Amino acid sequence: MSASASPVSKGAAIGSAAFSPLYKQIKALLVQSLHGGEWKPGESIPSELDLAARFQVSQGTVRKAIDELASENLLIRRQGKGTFVATHHEAQVRYRFLRLTPDDPENTQRAQSTILECSRQKATPEQARLLEVHNGESLI
């Protein structure tokens, strides 16, 4: 890497990048690429070595960024196959934290749901206390 080029100069600029760890900068660039549609859900992303060369950083730096994205379920690692953009099916996303099961073990039907309303609002003092968030924080 030349002295004049920053390690992430081949990607997009990141605001206040000098104050965040390099792997976080790479993670942000990967997220930009995901949101920009460079890789579609279900597609594989380039290898760690290819991404390291693209961003002019070490493979370990890329690995740490990918590990964080995998822990956030944006990427899926498959041993011996590569790393893929996660696909999120609406039904799976809705039941990610809440699993409804019938009382009768013989009943194998899956629970159905319908979203009646979805809006964004600021947390009231009572909501903030119950949800352990800051008063006025955005809630969905």
Image (cartoon, helix red, strand yellow):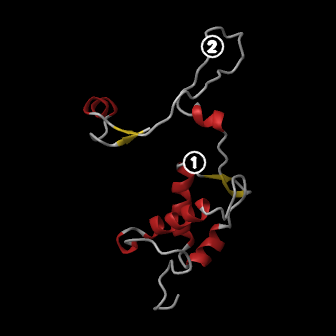
Mark 1 is surrounded, within 10 Å at the Cα level, by few (under 14), some (14 to 19) or many (20 or more) other residues, namely some
Q: Tag 2: residue type?
A: Pro
Camera-side residue of 104 and 59: 104
Image spot of residue 113 (x, y percent): 61, 24
Left or right of residue 6, residue 127 in this image: left
76 relative to 51, above or below: above
Q: Quadrant of residue 54?
A: bottom right
Q: Which residue is mark 1?
A: 73
For residue 45, the mark is: none
> Residue 132 or 47: which is nearer the viewer?
132
- Residue assigned mark 2: 102
Please state, as top left, top right, bottom left or bottom right, where the C terminus lies in the image. top left
Q: How many marks?
A: 2
What crowding class fits label 2: few (fewer than 14 Cα within 10 Å), some (14-19), or many (20 or more)?
few
Q: Are marks 1 and 2 in contact (CB under 8 Å)?
A: no
Q: Residue at x 33, y 43 (%)?
A: 137
Which amino acid type corresponds to the residue marked 1 in the rendered image? Asn
Q: CA distance from mark 1 to mark 2?
A: 28 Å
Q: Position of residue 26 (x, y in %)?
A: 51, 68
- Whole-percent x, y for residue 13 in the image: 48, 75
Q: Is residue 139 left or right of residue 100?
A: left
Q: Secondary structure at mark 1?
A: loop
Q: Quadrant of residue 135?
A: top left
Secondary element type, mark 2: loop
Above or below 13: residue 1 = below
